[in-house]
Amino acid sequence: MTHASGKYADFEALREKAVALRRQGLSLRQIRDELKIYNNDILNRLVKGEPPPAWTRRPNAKDDLRARARELRLQGWTYDRIEAELGCSKSSISLWVRDLPKPERRDPTEQAKLAARKRWEHELAIRDEERLRTKRAAAQETAELSARDLFIAGVALYWAEGSKDKPYDRRENVLFVNSDPGVIRLYLAWLDLLGVERDRLRYRVMIHMTADVEGAERYWGDVVGVDSSTFQKTTIKKHNPKTVRKNVGENYRGCLVVRVSQGAELYRRIEGWWHGMVSGITTSFSSGKV
């Protein structure tokens, strides 16, 4: 193709052809060779506004960084913060976000508070992870219980949480109340170890009147593995409007009362076991026998 005086006289006609070739998927080099146009400025003007075909685009390792930088800029981040976050140069960041609106300038005091809050959030995340690591490691240390371990744990648990006989109020009942399902499960496992038949157990829910009573009964029924319809009548606690209660919300399910029927003899043994443990501490550890 020739052009008068070496110039591109009919620019619009050439542009029409160049655009058609571009839309067919040709690269700039292919369009140049097809139309015999070797001036890059003219060539770029001919296809201006026409996106290059996908096959000519090279993967850009910075595409993800560019997208993230734009996202942060839209959130109001400064160049300095984006640079620190992404590890990119300010010149690159400026190029990537130059078409976006500038964030409103914050009061230096507000910026300092924001930075302090970010540092504190980071510190809290580290502390939470440390807590979880410690708890996981500790859980592994007690993951396997021997019968002796469960026996001692059950005696101590009952003496801490169960009902007790008093000289002024003789009640040799095996009655246990708790709101922690894990504690209830351990307690029931302990009763199994002692040979207490499950049909001797009586269950009752204690809960505040403002809670979901039926939902709590179903929940505790699932925990102990029985139909909640077999529970004794639920004890409803009246709410004192002057008291600010924290045990509220959908996760509040009150307490479960577990009573062993005909448990006087068992109670006496539990009390004896406990006093024996206390005596054992005094005898063994005080004398240095570890």
Image (cartoon, rainbow, N blue to C red):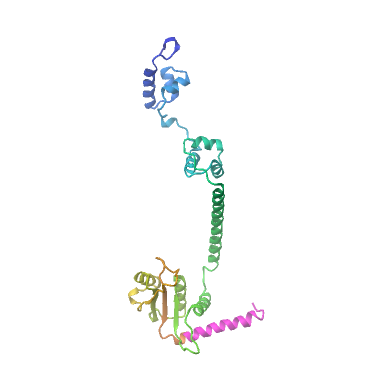
Where does the image place residue 179, in percent across and percent down from the top left?
Answer: 44, 72
Q: Looking at the picture, tell me which residue is in the foreground, 99 or 178.
A: 99
Q: How many marks?
A: 0
Q: Please state the extent of the stretch shown in magenta in the rendering.
A: 267-290
Left or right of 72? Residue 284 is right
Where does the image place residue 281, in percent across and percent down from the top left?
Answer: 60, 80
Q: In the image, is residue 12 part of the stretch drawn in magenta?
A: no
Q: In the image, is residue 277 part of the stretch drawn in magenta?
A: yes
Q: Looking at the picture, tell me which residue is in the foreground, 140 or 105.
A: 105
Q: Residue at x 43, y 22 (%)?
A: 45
Q: Relative to 221, is 13 above or below?
A: above
Left or right of 278? Residue 238 is left
Where does the image place residue 40, in percent across and percent down from the top left?
Answer: 47, 21
Where does the image place residue 199, in percent across and percent down from the top left?
Answer: 38, 80
Q: Looking at the picture, tell me which residue is in the foreground, 183 or 237.
A: 237
**Quadrant housing the N terminus:** top left
Q: Quadrant of residue 233?
A: bottom left
Q: Residue at x 51, y 84 (%)?
A: 271
Q: Relative to 54, is 236 above or below?
A: below
Q: Relative to 256, is 39 above or below?
A: above
Q: Quadrant of residue 51?
A: top left
